[in-house]
Amino acid sequence: MISQSNPPADAAERRAIQPVICYPNDTLPPADLALYRAARATATKTDEILVPARDARCFTVPAGHFFRISSVEGPQVGDLNLWNTGDLTERFYSGKTRALHGTHITTGERMWSSFPHLRPMTTIIEDTLGWYGMDAFGGSVHDVIGTRCDPYTGNLLAAGTQYHYCCHSNLTRALADHMGVPLAEAEPLVHDVLNVFMCTGFTRDTGQYFMKASPVRPGDYLEFFAEINVTGGLSACPGGDCSSEHTSDVASCHPLLVEVFAPAEGALGNWQSPGENGYDRSHGR
Ligand SMILES: [Zn+2]
């Protein structure tokens, strides 16, 4: 952002106005973390998917089940898409999740779905990188500010580039294979991601999106409770730990592990999967 205009006489006064939180989130339906964690303690593993480096895989998680994304072998970030298994047009809404929870999400926070549904798709129940907080550069982990690396932006910034293993393409191939449809049918369903393990922020002086080497190490994980039936798509980003560049094969990359767990019978008590958003959709007519 470059400003060319001359400041008015009361510029300092205007800048000194205190900010107001756009969406105070203390009236959001609360997540019963204690219940989820207790159910997870007796849950049993039902599936395991190893996402190869510079590639993606899809997986399904029934409502009330859990999934864990782990770093294995070496530091690696992942780009996560989520869809409602029964209706793939209901998908993760990165922008609204950011508006509700902030630029990065961690334990107790949710991944919200697109309009007209706007309901929690998952709740984060464990984050071994929760200790990281916000660093001196304004960087933090697991952002909902990035989009997903893609070959179109790569082509725009470096004319002529045809790189095929960006997260956007990886997710497109994985979803096409999962659904058994052509790439052209899967591609429009790919959306902005949760950047799992990625360490990012905005520079204070220019407001530019930055990334830095992820603090993730093998054994670290992020664990989710599925609030509705979800299909996940996870890409092991060609940026590796995102310490240098992406949209190329330069960075050293590692696989990511996804594990799915089923709760024991009755472990969730009276928990119910959240219904559709309560807005009546009449839009003033
Ligand atoms: Zn990526």
Image (cartoon, rainbow, N blue to C red):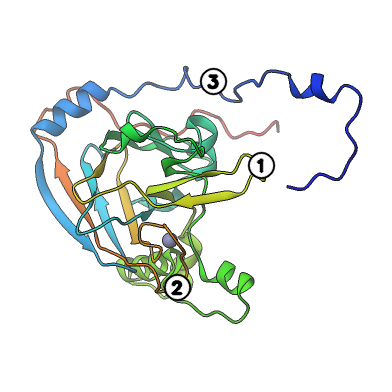
The residue labelled by disc 1 is 205
Location of residue 245 in the rendering, given as x and y in whole percent from the top left corner:
47, 64
Label 2 – label 3 distance at C-alpha: 40 Å
Residue lying at 44% horizontally and 36% vertically, measured from the top left: 135
**Comes first in the chain, label 2 or label 3:** 3
Give residue 24's mark. Answer: 3
Label 1 CB, ligand 1: below 8 Å? no
* Quadrant into which the C terminus falls: top right
| Crowd class of label 3 (few under 14; some 14 to 19; many from 20; radius 10 Å) | few
Location of residue 223 in the rendering, given as x and y in whole percent from the top left corner:
25, 40
Q: Residue 282 appears in which quarter of the rendering?
A: top right
Q: Residue 133 appears in which quarter of the rendering?
A: top left
Compared across the picture, whether 55 is left or right of 40 comes to right
Query: Taking 212 as reference, is 11 above or below it?
Result: above
Residue lying at 15% horizontally and 56% vertically, measured from the top left: 48
Query: Do we see residue 161 in this rendering?
Result: yes
Label 1 – label 2 distance at C-alpha: 28 Å
The amino acid sitting under disc 1 is Asp
Q: Which of 271 and 139 is in front in this view?
A: 139
Residue lying at 45% horizontally and 22% vertically, measured from the top left: 28
Label 2 CB, ligand 1: below 8 Å? no
The amino acid sitting under disc 2 is Ser
Q: Which of 272 and 253 is in front in this view?
A: 253
Query: Taking 91 as reference, is 168 above or below it?
Result: below
Location of residue 231 in the rendering, given as x and y in whole percent from the top left corner:
32, 53
Local SS, label 1? loop
Front of the two marks 3 and 1: 1
Front of the two marks 1 and 2: 1
Local SS, label 2? loop
Compared across the picture, whether 153 is left or right of 177 comes to right
Q: Which of 271 and 16 is in front in this view?
A: 16
